Amino acid sequence: MKKLTLGIVAITFLFTSCNDDNSDEILDQSAIDMSSFYLYTNADSEEPIRIAEGKSVCYSMVNLNRLLNENKGLNKIMYDIEYNTRDFIKKKPGNGNGGNPNNGGNTPPKVDNLGVVNIPIYVHVIYSNSQQNISSAQINSQITVLNNDFRKTNSDANQVPLEFADLAADTEINFSLAGTYKYANSRVSWGTNDAMKVAYPPVTPDTHLNIWICNIGNGILGYAQFPGGPSETDGIVISPQYFGTQGFVSAPYNGGRTATHEVGHYLNLRHIWGDGRCKKDDFVVDTPTSDGPNYGCPSYPTKNCRSNDMTMNYMDYTDDACMSMFSEGQKSRMRAILQPGASRASLSGN
Ligand SMILES: [Zn+2]
């Protein structure tokens, strides 16, 4: 509703300008509405409550709060990344302004020419016992899940209810295993303050997704660093029993969807409920609002705000067996971050 109101104001202004006929002002329809943008969330208090309730969580938003506190320049960097993301999405052909001759010529379209992008992965396995020293088969099973989920070739894609089926996206992003590093270390749990990355730094994080597999502890499945963060800690961390689909895995997070979820964050996706109540957004137009995460395997429809929740989205907290899609809007956000000049362009060879 806010955007519609702004649009009416903009059109009114346009006609007013034309009537005056002596104004050189060009209405900048390329201006990006950043009013919904936020970085800090209540994750620092909310996630520990969920843990205390015995629930499993992702710590990406808590990690983001910490990084924002530690790096005073990060706020501006992430604001600019968000601005450019919204600019790209707004100017995509077929998405409103892109290529529209009525836009005054000041908003040339931004075309996604990348085709299928392959992201190479380095896996760092840090183990204190033989179980945590996961096998190549387990690692490869995770790469397979990532490729199926991001290319919409997952066998459970047909679980998406009709309401959302047309929104389910092939993100046209592939993954390949570039190498595995193994480190024996007596430390039993690594927490979420990037200790594993200090001990074992990422390898060429500009061009490779680095994934640390180590016991995080405390019911935490994993956490990711969003685009814009320090390169020396860039990548994602997952506890070994939530990585892949075979070997040392633990139900109900034995479907490889923790990595799918964390790579989503790494490519600039927020949680589907926006880490706030109904009015907080995940900056994606085609994902319904929700006032919190869903757990387990919710039946359809599940409603927390005024619309049905997309509980089967990879960016919710539902069981691995009950999530099965990214949306087209999420695809646009992820691909925006890979475009030439964007924060993760070098992952796509640009
Ligand atoms: Zn998450």
Image (spheres, helix red, strand yellow):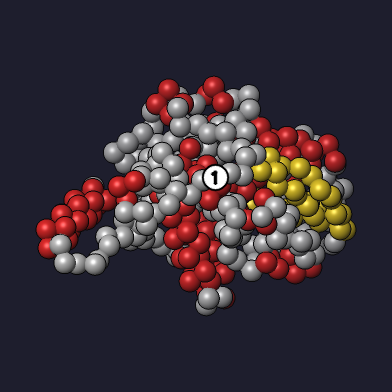
Please tell me whether mark 1 sits on a helix, a strand or a loop.
Answer: loop
Question: How many labels, in total?
Answer: 1
In the rendered image of this protein, does residue 271 appear above or below residue 245?
A: below
Which residue appears at 50% of the width and 61% of the height? 81
Q: Which of these two is toward me, 273 or 339? A: 339
Label 1 Cα crowd, 10 Å radius (few <14 / some 14-19 / many 20+) = some
Left or right of 229 in this view: 8: left
Residue 115: x and y, percent?
62, 40
Task: Indicate the amino acid at tag 1.
Answer: Asp
Q: Which of these two is toward me, 332 or 125? A: 332
Image quarter where the C terminus lies is bottom right
Residue under label 1: 112
In the rendered image of this protein, does residue 40 appear above or below residue 170?
A: below
Residue 229: x and y, percent?
60, 66
In the rendered image of this protein, does residue 343 appear above or below residue 1?
A: below
Which residue appears at 64% of the width and 69% of the height? 230
Residue 206: x and y, percent?
70, 60
Is ligand 1 less than 8 Å from the beta carbon at label 1? no
Q: Quadrant of residue 140?
A: top right
In this orientation, does residue 216 appear? no
Which residue appears at 49% of the width and 37% of the height? 327
Residue 279: x and y, percent?
32, 51
Q: For the view shown, which residue lies furthest in the front direction?
A: 22
Left or right of 117 in this view: 269: left
Q: Quadrant of residue 259?
A: top right
Which residue appears at 84% of the width and 50% of the height? 180
